[in-house]
Structure formats: C-alpha cells, structure tokens
Image: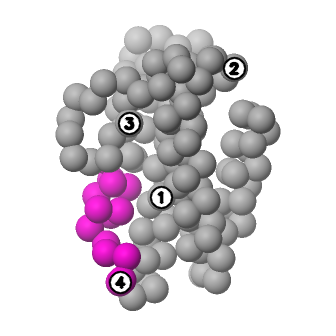
Amino acid sequence: ILTSGNNEFMWKFFYKVINNANGIINTIPDDSPQEALNFKYKSYTYRAIAYFYLIRIYQHTKADDSTKAIPIDFGDVVGQEKSTVSEVKQLILDDLTLAYNGLETYSRPSKQEVDANVVAAYLARYHLTYE
C-alpha cells in the first residue's frame, strides 16, 4: 500500500534515475568509442526500466493509450506536462530496443552489470505487460 511518503520517495527515486540516465545519454556522442557507448546503452536501459515502473505504478496497466500518464523528461526541461500512455510505452520500447542492439556484443564483467540478456528480459516483460 502506497502512503504519501512512499509515493513521494518512489516518484523522486525513479525520476532521479531518469535524470542521471539522461545526463549520460545526452553527453556521450553516437560516434564515441565502444566503451563509452556501452555506458550510453546501459543508461537507455535504466531510463526504460524507470519509466516502466513509473507507468505501472501511476497508471493502470490496461489504460487507454490516449490517457495522460506521467511526464517524459529528456533532461532539457523541468516541469513537463504529462505524456500519454502510448508515448511512455513507445519510449520504453525504443530505449530497450536501442539498448539491446547496442549491447549485443558487450560481455559484462560481472552479473551486477546490464548486458543484452538483461535488456531482453525487460523487453519480454514489456511485451507480456502490454501486448
């Protein structure tokens, strides 16, 4: 059961993850060395996971795609208006797909890191939830 304190904590926590991910995504150019790009692709994963949890917490899973849900923040403007469920779902899918393709050849040094297998698990979870 969510209380106002828990609600505020989760909202701030996931948007902090999104903010940190946006900082990395917006800083690393697409023509960077592969090692740097791996951080960028991992950041797409973290951003997608954060939005995935936010949309599931703050909007009914089967809500109509045109329903206003949560704000999408790309790191450029604070105080965004709420985006539709469809826009959030598309961002999650785009981020996870981009991360999966970018991390296909990445071999993680430990199980504490994200790789294509982790992204594939979240892609499966996304499709089980929304299709």
Task: Name the element at disc 1.
Answer: helix
Q: Along the polypeptide, which appears first: circle 1 or circle 3?
A: 1
Q: Name the residue nearer the viewer: 131 or 58.
A: 131
Indicate the position of residue 9 as horizontal and vertical percent values. 39, 27
Q: Along the polypeptide, which appears first: circle 2 or circle 1?
A: 1
Q: In the rendered image, which residue does mark 3 sit on?
A: 72
Mark 2 → mark 1, Cα distance in angstroms: 24 Å
The magenta-colored residue range is 19-32
State if disc 4 and disc 2 touch (CB < 8 Å): no
Name which quarter of the figure residue 112 lies in.
bottom right
Q: Residue type at mark 3? A: Ile
Q: Is residue 2 left or right of residue 119?
A: left
Q: Residues within 10 Å of mark 4 (few under 14, many from 20)?
A: few
Residue at the front extreme? 66
| Mark seen at residue 62 | 2
Q: Main secondary structure of the magenta part?
A: helix
Q: Along the polypeptide, which appears first: circle 2 or circle 4?
A: 4
Q: In the rendered image, which residue does mark 4 sit on?
A: 32
Task: Name the element at disc 2.
Answer: loop
Indicate the position of residue 14 as horizontal and vertical percent values. 42, 38
Q: Along the polypeptide, which appears first: circle 4 or circle 3?
A: 4
Task: Name the element at disc 3.
Answer: loop
Mark 1 → mark 3, Cα distance in angstroms: 14 Å
Q: In the rendered image, which residue does mark 1 sit on?
A: 44
Q: Residue type at mark 1? A: Tyr
Q: Residue type at mark 2? A: Lys
Mark 2 → mark 4, Cα distance in angstroms: 39 Å
The count of marks equals 4
Residue 23 forms part of the magenta stretch: yes
